[in-house]
RNA sequence: GGUCCCGUAGCUCAGCUGGAUAGAGCAGCAGCCUUCUAAGCUGUUGGUCGCAGGUUCAAGUCCUGCCGGGAUCGCCA
């Protein structure tokens, strides 16, 4: 039940009846939304203005014809033309009240839609290098990607959560060598970790595991022989580490895709490059030296290039390094072709701020490998600055390790971590204040929203205590006399509830989960406000022993608020406690 | 130098992918606790939407050029 979608359909139908020749594409161009100024009415549409010009008519004439279609309609109490051609509707209370019943009937599914039409969408996120535990910088992208995935699933997309394991580069060799040092250390050698190696303690268990499995035998092998063995072991261990970190945040990927599987003879990279060559998209050539800071070891040479600039990138991009191995980008082209061949025409990549320069070539790659059939949206998560009591926080600890994702979650909890990271647009840098998210005051939005949910339960507990004879079962709530819900403060709440499905679809389409966080904060605020009204005016209290009928109607409203708060928080991966201790 | 992101109230930020008189929270000021958990609420002060042009019925929103802040810049991943 989406009131806005309901009116949108009705208006489109009316327009099609009035103007049979009207271009149907226009019928999806107008919007139905709550006007900024509530004085203008409950719903407003710009339909007349959108349609007027192509029809060669004045907006107000179109509006007048449209208004005539709604005269005497049961759903509306008034329809007015305003300003340059807006149409403002006042919706009958009965329709608003039916929203409460709809929330009750649909329960956890309230807000669900099928705008995705079951289309497969691949969301690649996190993809942190498998060289150690996740550090705090990865957290934002992890939470964002996960929330976006849940959101789009709820809107009817067939979502695959995917993690790309960068296990093919030189840093993995360094990782394996670092683990090998720990192995030798376990065997009794005194080891100094040289610069450029991974010094973290987290490799000690890997060394131990190698010692358990191979005793001392690896030590006497040449590196070429032990390296692949150690690499296999250490990669599995690191991935387990990362999965454990992610599960701390309640995040689980459907697919872990290894970059290594793309390499080698007959692998996807070779196939993809051969295919690109057939298309004439690969050539030998030179690039201009980059402006700005030029590396000392820059060497102008002829190289193998992909025609990225044919697809909107600024320059063509190198595919092969000077040592003959493939560039990261070459593997990434193959990887995205692989996604396309797996049936994904919609891809979303969640990347950190340092990858913003990568967007154009990625889009170029997707366009090229799909023949323009697939699209990719790259969502950049900007930096998070850690603060404590308003002061910048050291990102590295004494041991030299970075602050890890686990540190943050252990410090402030999953709910606070997730909500705070989602309570901001992804493309703006943000501050994360450790002290604030642990506060139990209204300044802390996580707490504020969870408190609203706990309050809905508290009201039911009170009702049970003070009116033991009252039947507050789901069936009784469903049968409540909703026509009693009429005061402005109540209608404000109901209107917000009615806007939930619309908020979900809009956030899905825009790939912006933060809108749900703001929505739920708004709903919590409206609920707290209504709750407080009962203090000044006892007739506005939810539970009133003198008025069982009214109490039941109000409880039905509270239950709807409870359900939507729960739905929205669940979507964000934040728990909704029934009681705050 | 190129590219991308940001610039909205003293501070932190929304602004529903072009709509009507630009909104919240914090801070400030003035109020509300023998409570349906005050862990909350009400009222109020505060704006040249960085600047200048352009597009149109309509621009914080789209385009161009500047200014300021951040990120990034052939073979790292």
Image (cartoon, rainbow, N blue to C red):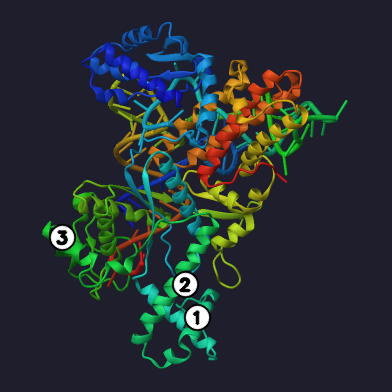
Residue A256 seen by the camera: yes
Q: Chain of mark 2?
A: A
Q: Are marks 2 and 1 in contact (CB under 8 Å)?
A: yes
The residues tagged by marks 3 and 1 sit, at their Cα atoms, a distance apart of: 43 Å
Q: Which image quadrant for residue A281?
A: bottom left
Q: Chain of mark 1?
A: A
Which mark, by number, is residue A275? Answer: 3
Of marks 3 and 2, the one in the foreground? 2
Task: Tell me which residue sits at (49%, 49%) in the image.
Answer: A429
Quarter of the picture containing the N terminus of chain A is top left
A184 with respect to B43 (left or right): left
Check disc 2 and report the residue beneath it: A237
Q: Position of residue A308 (x, y in %)?
A: 22, 55
Check disc 1 and report the residue beneath it: A209
Task: Tell me which residue sits at (21%, 16%) in the image.
Answer: A21
Q: Are marks 3 and 1 in contact (CB under 8 Å)?
A: no
Q: Are marks 3 and 2 in contact (CB under 8 Å)?
A: no
- Decide: few, some or many residues near mark 2? Use Cα within 10 Å; few <14, some 14-19, many ≥20: many
Q: Is residue A168 above or below residue A475?
A: below
Q: Is residue A181 above or below residue B4?
A: below
Q: Position of residue A492 (x, y in %)?
A: 58, 23
């Amino acid at each position: 039940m989406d009131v806005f979608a309901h009116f949108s359909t009705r208006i489109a139908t009316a327009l099609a009846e009035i103007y049979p020749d009207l271009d149907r594409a226009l019928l999806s161009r107008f919007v139905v939304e709550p006007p900024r100024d509530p004085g203008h009415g409950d719903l407003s549409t710009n339909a007349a203005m959108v349609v007027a010009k192509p029809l060669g008519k004045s907006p107000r004439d179109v509006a007048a014809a449209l208004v005539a279609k709604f005269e005497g309609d049961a759903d509306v109490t008034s329809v007015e033309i305003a300003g340059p051609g807006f149409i403002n509707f006042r919706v009958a209370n009965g329709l608003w009240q039916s929203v409460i019943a709809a929330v009750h009937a649909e329960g956890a599914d309230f807000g669900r839609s099928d705008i995705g039409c079951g289309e497969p969408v691949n969301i690649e996120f996190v993809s942190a290098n498998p060289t150690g535990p996740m550090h705090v910088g990865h957290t934002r992208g992890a939470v964002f990607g996960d929330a976006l995935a849940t959101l789009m699933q709820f809107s009817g997309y067939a979502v695959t959560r995917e993690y790309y394991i960068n296990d093919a580069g030189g840093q993995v060799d360094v990782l394996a060598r670092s683990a090998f040092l720990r192995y030798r250390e376990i065997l009794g050698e005194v080891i100094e970790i040289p610069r450029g190696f991974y010094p973290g303690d987290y490799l000690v268990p890997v060394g131990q595991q190698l010692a358990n499995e191979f005793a001392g035998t690896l030590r006497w092998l040449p590196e070429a022989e032990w390296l692949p063995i150690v690499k296999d072991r250490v990669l599995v261990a690191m991935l387990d580490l990362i999965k454990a970190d992610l599960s701390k945040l309640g995040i689980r990927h459907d697919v872990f895709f290894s970059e290594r599987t793309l390499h080698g003879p007959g692998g996807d990279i070779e196939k993809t490059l051969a295919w690109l060559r057939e298309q004439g998209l690969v050539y030998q050539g030179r690039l201009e030296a980059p402006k700005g800071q030029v590396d000392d070891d820059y060497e102008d040479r002829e190289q193998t290039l992909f025609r990225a600039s044919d697809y909107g990138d600024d320059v063509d991009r190198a595919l092969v390094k000077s040592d003959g191995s493939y560039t990261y980008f070459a593997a990434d082209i193959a990887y995205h072709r692989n996604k396309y061949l797996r049936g994904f025409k919609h891809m979303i990549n969640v990347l950190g701020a340092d990858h913003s320069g990568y967007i154009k070539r990625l889009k170029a790659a997707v366009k090229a490998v799909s023949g323009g059939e697939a699209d990719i949206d790259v969502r950049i998560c900007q930096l998070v600055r850690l603060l404590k009591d308003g002061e910048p926080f050291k990102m590295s600890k004494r041991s030299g390790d970075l602050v890890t994702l686990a540190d943050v979650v252990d410090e402030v909890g999953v709910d606070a971590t997730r909500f705070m990271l989602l309570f901001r647009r992804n493309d703006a840098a943000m501050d994360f204040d450790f002290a604030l998210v642990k506060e139990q005051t209204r300044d802390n939005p996580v707490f504020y929203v969870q408190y609203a949910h706990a309050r809905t339960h508290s009201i039911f507990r009170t009702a049970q205590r003070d009116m033991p004879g009252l039947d507050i079962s789901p069936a009784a709530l469903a049968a409540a006399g909703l026509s009693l819900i009429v005061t402005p403060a109540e209608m404000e709440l109901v209107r917000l509830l009615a806007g939930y499905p619309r908020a979900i679809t809009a956030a899905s389409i825009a790939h912006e989960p933060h809108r749900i966080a703001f929505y739920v904060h708004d709903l919590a605020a409206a609920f707290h406000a209504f709750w407080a009204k009962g203090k000044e005016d006892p007739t506005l209290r939810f539970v009133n022993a003198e008025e069982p009928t009214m109490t039941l109607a109000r409880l039905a409203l509270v239950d709807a608020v409870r359900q939507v708060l729960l739905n929205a928080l669940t979507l964000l991966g934040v728990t909704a406690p029934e009681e705050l201790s």
